[in-house]
Image: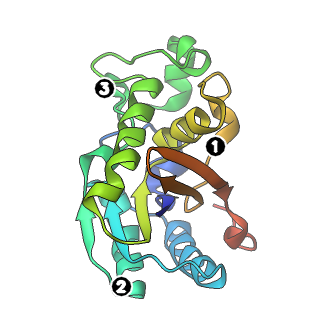
Amino acid sequence: MKALLIRHPQTEWNRAGIIQGRLDSPLTPRGHEESHALLRGLLDAGIHPDAVFSSPLGRAQQMALRIAEQYQCDIRLDEALQEQDFGEFDGRLLSDIRREYPRFAEDETFQPPQGESPGQAAQRLLDFLHRLPGICPHHTVALVSHGQIMQAAIAQLLENSLDNVARYHHPNASYSLVEINHSTCEVVRWGVASHLLGLKTG
């Protein structure tokens, strides 16, 4: 099975540097452009999802709906695809959190108050990937999720560590391709964003 891990397009809070976590904000005009660019990019790459799973959060569902419409397939929502739970940090400026809690940016085991650590979030997504073949019979599946949990999961798969998790940053509307074979998950490509070249910044 091939699983396509897709980050949602840009939102207003992404642009403003606000932590969204389990909260939500509308897509920006660029975010809508990114959605179209991603759909074109998947077609150009010859990727044809047979099913779509999405985080229940609105910013992910909007992207999932467009993918499902393009490929005429069903959508299933799964809480395992939600963003890392930032607890009390949701809705706050990232710059403020980094200043008040230096460990937030430096220690990947750091757990925000009432939230979860990057390691806990990564494990949640990896557990979902491992059980995916048992709940979905299709060959290629699109999973629309979020940046922080995706980069943590990719770091864990490639390095079996979260020491360098920032290296695996995924821009909005980028994707990674993972191949699932029995009990193993292998990263084929990560952070694919070439389809976003040429879009206006903002």
The percent position of residue 147, horizontal first and vertical second, equals 51, 46
Tell me the element at label 2.
Answer: helix
Residue 20 visible, this angle: no
> Is 36 situated left or right of 133 in this image?
right
The percent position of residue 87, horizontal first and vertical second, equals 31, 26
**Which residue is identified by label 2?**
69
In the depicted view, which residue is nearer to us: 110 or 46? 46
**Which residue is identified by label 1?**
169
Tell me the element at label 1.
Answer: loop
* Separation of marks 2 and 1 at Cα, in angstroms: 28 Å
The percent position of residue 74, horizontal first and vertical second, equals 27, 77
* Separation of marks 3 and 2 at Cα, in angstroms: 33 Å
**Which residue is identified by label 3?**
87
In this rendering, the answer to whether 116 lies above or below 154 is above
Name the quarter where the C terminus is drawn. bottom right
Q: Does the CB distance between marks 3 and 2 fall below 8 Å?
A: no
Residue type at mark 1 is: His
Closer to the N terminus: mark 2 or mark 1?
Answer: 2
Look at 57% across and 15% down and name the residue there.
107
Look at 42% across and 67% down and name the residue there.
141
